[in-house]
Image (cartoon, rainbow, N blue to C red):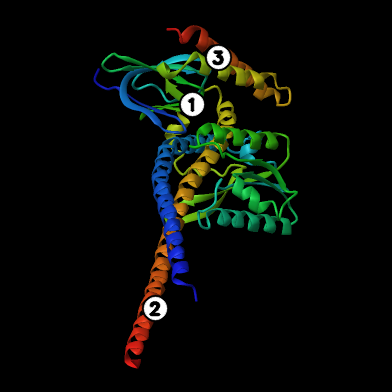
Amino acid sequence: MPSLKDLRNRIASVKATQKITKAMQMVAAAKLRRAQEAAVAARPYSERMGAVLANIAASTAGSPDASPLLAGTGKSDVHLLVVCTGERGLAGAFNSSIARLARDHARRLKAEGKTVKIFTVGRKGYDSLRREFPNEIVENVSFRSVKQISYSEARSVARRVLEMFGAGEFDVATLFFSHFQSVIAQIPTAQQIIPAELPTAATVNAEAALYEYEPSEEDILADLLPRNIAIQIFHALLENAASFYGAQMSAMDNATRNAGDMINRLSLSYNRQRQAQITKELIEIISGAEAL
Amino acid sequence: MADGLKFDLVSPERLLFSEIVESVVVPGTEGYLTVLANHAPLMTTLRPGVIEIKAQSGTVTRFFVGGGLVDINASGLTILADEAMGAEQMTSDYLSERIRVSREDADNTGIDYITRTTARQRVSDLEDVQRWILPA
């Protein structure tokens, strides 16, 4: 049975923890708003890029010298998994659920006899994957010092991926990130980026045929495809940032509530004990007086 | 002018400019072109340079773009820029840094020929911007 003094100290320390988690929740909420704004602001570009790409790809479809970025290398022996996670923890299951999805994917591919290579973006993914796949991780970047993800980070990742693809180091690349659905729901997602999965252009309208291209369609496509990789990675990083703060916010909200419950329980037993002590003293006094 | 040109300038990070304007001068890969309303549908890539927007009131706004894609269709002109900023925010230091990075690529024999050629082209385009366009 802890003494009254112990209980008092315990309550004080839980209160201090609660203050910290509460503050972290509020910081995460503010950052979440900013991350969401960034994700929304990036949407027009990627939407239009997708539309333009689908148009051109549809009109050059079937040409024998299609870019390998679009048509693939014809094999699917070596898979590259680009795993984007957060730099920090304390965000509930955010990092582990992305890592789990990537791990399951990697295991399945290995069972099929494929070669797996892993490119981790973010420290947490690296930490949790390196135990099981020490030899598969070929690259690891982390943006610890970066406050707000900008396009140049995405471009540097894309560049590395394209260099590896150019050197024939893999056939298929898949991007893993967490799709931000709402503050309480973040869905870990796998998206194939090489060869590109384009939205099948149902809207290959007559207008597209009227376009004049300068330089040729093939040249524009060749210019656009690498850029599209960077855009998709950028999109994933932004979604991830928003998901991360969303997950952190709800994790910290839970922590604050748990601390509250704990304080209630501790206060109750503190008060009980105090009352018990008072009662005990009274009994002593009364029985002492009666003995006289 | 009865009908203007609907013009959107989009960078990966945000929508920078969206207005009805008089005309826009665009640094296309195969030369500068001026886009007015009802331009024929055209798609071209951009070289690093400065776009000049003439508003319907006649005032001129300039943006630096670091390459991208131009899409002209019936609904207007859309520029998808890799990187874009107001020309007044553009400093010579920043440009020098960009030139240095591109030059590294151009001299990097580890990467393939096409990338190197485009990097070399970018260096010369950026130098043009620095030498002729920026002081204006």
Residue A25 vs residue A78, the one in the foreground = A25
In the rendered image, residue A64, in percent from the top left (x then y), is placed at: 66, 35
Are the residues tagged 3 and 1 within 8 Å (C-beta)?
no
Q: Residue drawn at (55%, 40%), measured in percent from left and top?
A: A233
Instruction: Decide: is A258 above or below A190.
Output: below
Tell me which label, 3 or 1, sits earlier in the chain.
1
Question: Do dots 3 and 2 share one subunit?
Answer: no
Up/down of B34 relative to A125, above or below:
above
Q: CA distance from mark 2 to mark 1?
A: 73 Å
Q: Chain of mark 1?
A: B
Camera-nearest residue between A92 and A205: A92
Q: Position of residue A166 (x, y in %)?
A: 70, 34
Which residue sits furthest bottom? A291
- Image quarter of residue A113: bottom right
Secondary structure of the residue carrying tag 3 is: helix
Q: In the image, A54: left or right of B21?
A: right
Q: Which mark is residue B83?
A: 1
**Numbered mark located on residue B125 in the image:** 3
Q: Is residue A149 above or below residue A252?
A: above
Q: Position of residue B126 (x, y in %)?
A: 54, 15
Callouts 2 and 1 close, C-beta under 8 Å: no
Kind of element beneath mark 1: loop
Question: What residue is disc 2 on?
Answer: A277
* Other residues around mark 1 within 10 Å, as few (<14) / some (14–19) / many (≥20): some
Q: Residue at x 64, y 58 (%)?
A: A104
Q: Quadrant of the C terminus of chain A?
A: bottom left
Residue extending furthest toward the front: A292
- Image-quadrant location for residue A112: bottom right
- Element class at badge 2: helix
Q: Which mark is residue A266?
A: none
CA separation in Å, label 3 and label 1: 15 Å
